[in-house]
Image (spheres, rainbow, N blue to C red):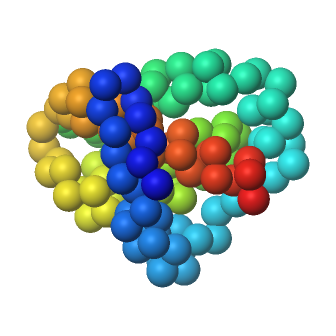
């Protein structure tokens, strides 16, 4: 399935197929509380939160606590980041082939947000 973020469309079916093969990544799911949060706040707010969290916790070139900067719970975006390999630069490089050690470009940040939002959308439908 292709999803669009601004002027760019991403085909994420291959990525989600690979993630489904990972016992660790596939254990993440939204609880009823997190689904309610998305419904109550709305998609625009959740997307804004995703963009802010990606910019702060994933995009910098150097992250002092890389690998531990994203909590496992507390916000639907955090859960989605772990489920999609967008939680730290090591995982991001492994799953998305975007190298660590440099700041993410705006396009790469948009891609990460698109991946997180697509995972959330699929969780809300399933």
User: Does 59 sit above or below residue 83?
Assistant: above
Q: Residue at x 46, y 22 (%)?
A: 52
Q: Where is residue 10 shown, x and y percent of the image?
A: 34, 45
Q: Which one is nearer the viewer's eye here, 121 or 99?
A: 121
Left or right of 59? Residue 87 is: right
User: Does 52 sit above or below residue 3?
Assistant: above
Picture quarter with the C terminus: bottom right
Q: Kindly tell me whether residue 73 is visible in this rendering.
A: yes
Left or right of 81? Residue 77 is: right
Q: Where is residue 76 shown, x and y percent of the image?
A: 66, 41
Left or right of 10? Residue 116 is: right
Locate residue 69: give its quadrant.
Answer: top left
**Outermost residue, front direction?**
1
Q: Where is residue 50 shown, x and y percent of the image?
A: 51, 30
Q: Residue at x 83, y 24 (%)?
A: 40
User: Does 113 sit above or below residue 18?
Assistant: above
Locate residue 105: give its quadrant.
Answer: top left
Q: Which one is nearer the viewer's eye here, 104 or 57?
A: 104
Q: Kindly tell me whether residue 88 is visible in this rendering.
A: no
Q: Which one is nearer the viewer's eye here, 89 or 47?
A: 47
Q: Where is residue 19 shown, x and y percent of the image?
A: 46, 69
Left or right of 88? Residue 44 is: right
Q: Residue at x 41, y 35 (%)?
A: 4
Count of marks placed on residues = 0
User: Does 115 sit above or below residue 107?
Assistant: below
């Amino acid at each position: 399935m292709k999803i669009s973020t601004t002027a760019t469309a991403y085909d994420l079916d291959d990525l989600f197929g690979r993630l489904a093969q990972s016992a660790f990544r596939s254990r993440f799911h939204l609880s009823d509380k997190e689904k309610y949060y998305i419904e109550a706040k709305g998609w625009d707010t959740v997307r804004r939160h995703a963009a802010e969290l990606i910019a702060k916790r994933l995009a910098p070139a150097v992250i002092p606590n890389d690998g531990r900067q994203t909590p496992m719970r507390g916000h639907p975006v955090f859960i989605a980041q772990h489920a999609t390999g967008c939680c730290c630069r090591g995982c991001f490089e492994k799953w998305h082939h975007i190298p660590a050690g440099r700041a993410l470009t705006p396009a790469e940040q948009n891609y990460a947000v698109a991946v997180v939002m697509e995972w959330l959308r699929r969780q809300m439908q399933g």
